[in-house]
Image (cartoon, rainbow, N blue to C red):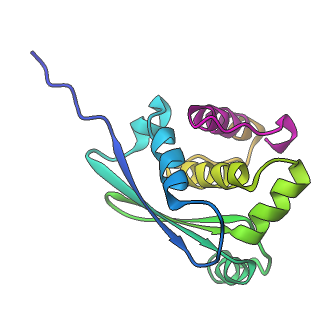
Amino acid sequence: MSAVPDSPRLEVEVVKAVRSPVAPAFVRSVLAQTATLPEVAARLPEGTASIAVRITGDRELRKLNMTFAGHDAVTDVLSFPGSGGHLGDLAISWPAVIRQAAEFKHKPQAELALLSVHGLLHLLGWDHATRSERKEMVRLTTAALELSRVRLPAARL
């Protein structure tokens, strides 16, 4: 009889550096659900993996973007790879969440879920530089959000 490996576990630390009405438990739940997708689970390290999510402001995202990517611009989400069992860190701009949710006519909570999943996929090696890569990221993002019952307008993805 062969042993069945434990299902991957993802521990998520959420730091709210700015006020936002979204509970950290929501972000943890979305990312934990994402980790159950077979493609995502296959890229997680054995045992327990961790990720840190920092919900912050435009000023901090702009500074991080300049420091680590050389881009002097505000962005919505940045991912910083970790090592070993720590997959890495995400920084998400709450003001960008609000702007993009208004632009695409959905709730900020849905936008935050989208950016969290997007960042996690980057930490696990997915990218969207080519058309085929974008298509795969959209497919995985859509599947992950469906697991958390988060719906976005088609134009958003």
Q: Nearer the viewer, residue 66 or 106?
A: 106
Q: How many marks?
A: 0
Report the residue at 75% width, 62% height from top: 97
Q: Main secondary structure of the magenta part?
A: helix
Task: Give the side of residue 137 with respect to residue 71, left or right.
Answer: left
51 relative to 139 in the view: left or right: left
Left or right, 29 with reference to 17? left
Name the spot of residue 153 as percent of width and height, x first.
Answer: 83, 38
* Residue at (64, 50) in percent of width and height: 113
Residue at the limit of the structure toward the top, as seen here? 1
Residue 65, picture quadrant: bottom right
User: Where is 103 relative to 40, above or below?
Assistant: below
Could you say which quadrant of the image residue 116 lies in? Answer: bottom right
Of the pair 46 and 116, the residue shown nearer to us: 116
**In front here: 45 or 133?**
45
- Residues rendered magenta in the picture: 135-157
The C terminus: image quadrant: top right
Image coordinates of residue 99 in percent, x first then y, are 84, 63
The quadrant in which the N terminus is found is top left
Residue at image point 80% right, 77% down: 73
Residue drawn at (64%, 78%) of the image: 18
Residue 67: x and y in percent read: 64, 83
Give the farthest residue toward the left: 1
Q: Position of residue 6 (x, y in %)?
A: 24, 35
Q: Is residue 20 magenta?
A: no
Q: Is residue 142 magenta?
A: yes
